Amino acid sequence: MNDRPNPGSFYSQAEMTGIGSYVPEKRLTNDDLSQIVDTNDEWIVRRTGIRERRIAGPREFSSHLAIEAVRDLLERYPTDSTDIDAVIGATTTPDFLFPSVASRVQQAFGIRRALAFDLNAACAGFVSAMQAANGLILSGAYRKIVVVGTETLSKITNYADRSTCILFGDGAGAVLLERAEKGAMLGSYAVTDGKGGSYVMAGGLASELDGQPAEEGGKIGQNGREVYKWAVSTIPDGMKNMLEKANLSIADLDWFVPHSANLRMIEAICERLGFPFERSLHSVGPYGNTSAASIPLALDLAVKEGKLKKGERIALYGFGSGLAQAGLVLDWTLE
């Protein structure tokens, strides 16, 4: 707990000092979807664990969700926003190709002289952005960084395709990372296998990737079977690699926070890791797959439910299109 030493070979002077989240008001339940495509609540829950998702309004976009998540963070963990010197947005669904979502967040809170950029690593985006923020703080050039994962996946979901429309929802989660005397980040890991890039893709200027046609209208296309096989077969090894780098083992973790893609996938990964499923945190049930927002949403749900205690050791692990993986082990520093 609090008296644990930092055992890792990877050292950082960053710690988390705030968290916030936001989801749109509109709910899309499984019963609602059964009115659109040939499906039902029992089938969806059994296959994915998803019960409903939140859907952004017609004039509500990723920057709006991000701004509300950061607003929630600043109200719950008061800090001088003028001291923030970087904003990193993790998203696959920006309002525009440019300007960035991060610049819209910067504008909304009147943050002056701040680096602001978006990072797209799909469902690994939030953890990748945290790794980037940690590196910026470790460089000594930055002291206080907001990282926000935000998605409006409903806007690129094909609601005629029952294999994908049951999965995706909208939401945003934000954290504040600050330089500290004793860093809380213990280890990290990242790997990409571009050969599987065509398994999950959306949007873009090209009509195909590696010979695989893109979904019409820029909508999400996914080979769910291949993604499931890849995730379950590779993520346990990635987790073990990350923990070994930090001189830790699975038994040293209090909580595991994987990307909330599919509850059955998380159960299979936990089984292969030898980690108790009940010690995993996820947001898939109430929110569906929210890509870069799923991990901060899961963390904030756990905070609101009183599950996370200061000093507990947690592993974040994002994975998705690319095919990209990004993991981070940290000590929980919030009350």
Image: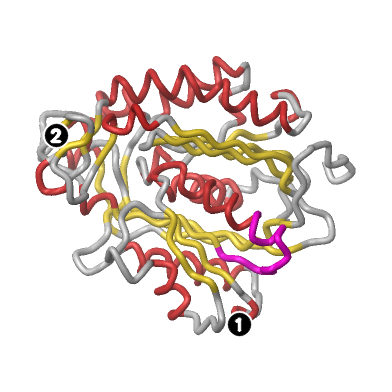
> What residue lies at 68% left-to-right and 68% top-to-bottom?
141
Instruction: Give me the C-alpha separation between circle 1 and circle 2.
Output: 46 Å
Q: Which mark is residue 268?
A: none
In this rendering, the count of numbered labels is 2
* Residue 143 among those drawn in magenta: yes
Question: Which residue type carries mark 2?
Answer: Pro
Horizontal relation, residue 41 to residue 48: left or right: left
Q: Position of residue 224 (x, y in %)?
A: 28, 25
Which residue is at the far front? 210
Q: Quadrant of the C terminus?
A: bottom right
Question: Which residue type carries mark 1?
Answer: Thr
Q: Is residue 97 above or below residue 315?
A: below
Disc 1 and disc 2 in contact, CB within 8 angstroms: no
Q: Which mark is residue 213?
A: 2
Q: Which mark is residue 82?
A: 1
Q: Position of residue 61 (x, y in %)?
A: 29, 64
> What residue lies at 27% left-to-right and 66% top-to-bottom?
96
- Write the start and end of the magenta stretch as one range: 135-146
